[in-house]
Image (cartoon, rainbow, N blue to C red):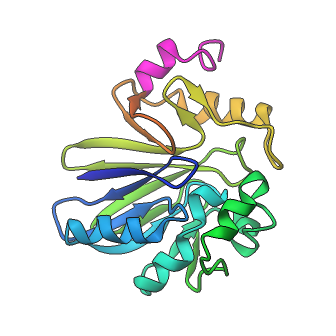
Amino acid sequence: MIVGRSLWVAGTNTWIVSDDNQECVIIDCPPDPLAIVALVNHYNLTPKAIITTHGHVDHTGGARSVSQRYPESPVCRHPDDAHYLRDPLQSSGMLREALRETGLDLSEPELIQDLHDGDRFKGAGMEFYTIHTPGHTPGSICLQVSLSDGEVLFTGDHLFKGSVGRTDLPGGSTELLNQSMREKILPLRDDLQVFPGHGETTTIGIERRSNPYLINL
C-alpha cells in the first residue's frame, strides 16, 4: 500500500509505504507534521523510519516533529545533504519565511541514519535499495522497493512526470543530474512505477519516451 498527500506551500508529496502489515515507512516529511501524523493514524500504522530523498526544507522540514512522535524511527538521508537538516532556515532560500511561520522545532532530529549508494535499508518488513542521484542536490537519492503488488521507485525531486529537478539552487548541477539519470535511472525497466516528490505518478518507460529532458539522454 502506498498512500500519498501533497502538503505545504510547495505541494510536496509525502508517501506512506506499507506492505501487508501495520508498520510503515514515511518517504519525505514536509513542514506539515500534523497532516502526516493524521495520515498515519487514519490507516492505523506505526512508522519504523522516515526517509528523506534530499535535504530541501519542503521535504525535511517536518522530520524533527514527526520523529519526536515516533522516537524509535530514524531519519534516514544521504550524508552529502546533512547540512540541510542541521540548519534548515539557513538553507531554505525563498521558503525561509514560510518555514519560520510554521513555528516548528527545526533542530536536527536526534536519531539519524546515513544512506549511501547501494545501501539496502530494511524497515517495516520492506527493503529499500538506495540509488544516489546527485544533481538536484549533492545528496539526492532515489529509493527502489519491491512490494506485494509490484516494484516502485521513489524519485524525490530527481525525476517528475514530464520534467526533472531544478539545478539552479545552491549545490545543484545539471551535468550531475544528467549523469545520474543516464547511468542509474534510465537503465531501469519500463514498467517500474515512479512516485515523485511533486506531481503525479508515472513510469520509467513513459518518461523515457516522452519526457523532453530525457529523450536526448
Q: Which residues are magenta?
A: 204-217
In the picture, measured across the screen, residue 170 lies left or right of residue 161, that is right
Closest to the observer: 124 or 34?
34
Quarter of the image containing the C terminus?
top right
Closest to the observer: 114 or 1?
1
Q: Residue at x 46, y 76 (%)?
A: 66
Q: Residue at x 36, y 75 (%)?
A: 48
Closest to the observer: 139 or 87?
87
Judge whether 132 appears above or below 41 on screen: above
Q: Is residue 124 visible?
A: no
Q: Residue at x 66, y 80 (%)?
A: 108
Q: Position of residue 162 (x, y in %)?
A: 53, 22
Q: Position of residue 37 (x, y in %)?
A: 36, 71
Q: Residue at x 63, y 27 (%)?
A: 182
Query: Which quadrant of the view contains residue 202?
Result: top left
Task: Looking at this view, name the residue that lies furthest to the front.
Answer: 101
How many marks overall?
Answer: 0
Query: Which quadrant of the view contains residue 52?
Result: bottom right
Q: Is residue 212 magenta?
A: yes
Q: Position of residue 151 (x, y in %)?
A: 31, 42
Closest to the observer: 187 or 134?
134
Q: Is residue 152 visible?
A: yes
Q: Position of residue 200 (x, y in %)?
A: 41, 34
Judge whether 83 appears above or below 9 on screen: below
Q: Is residue 3 magenta?
A: no
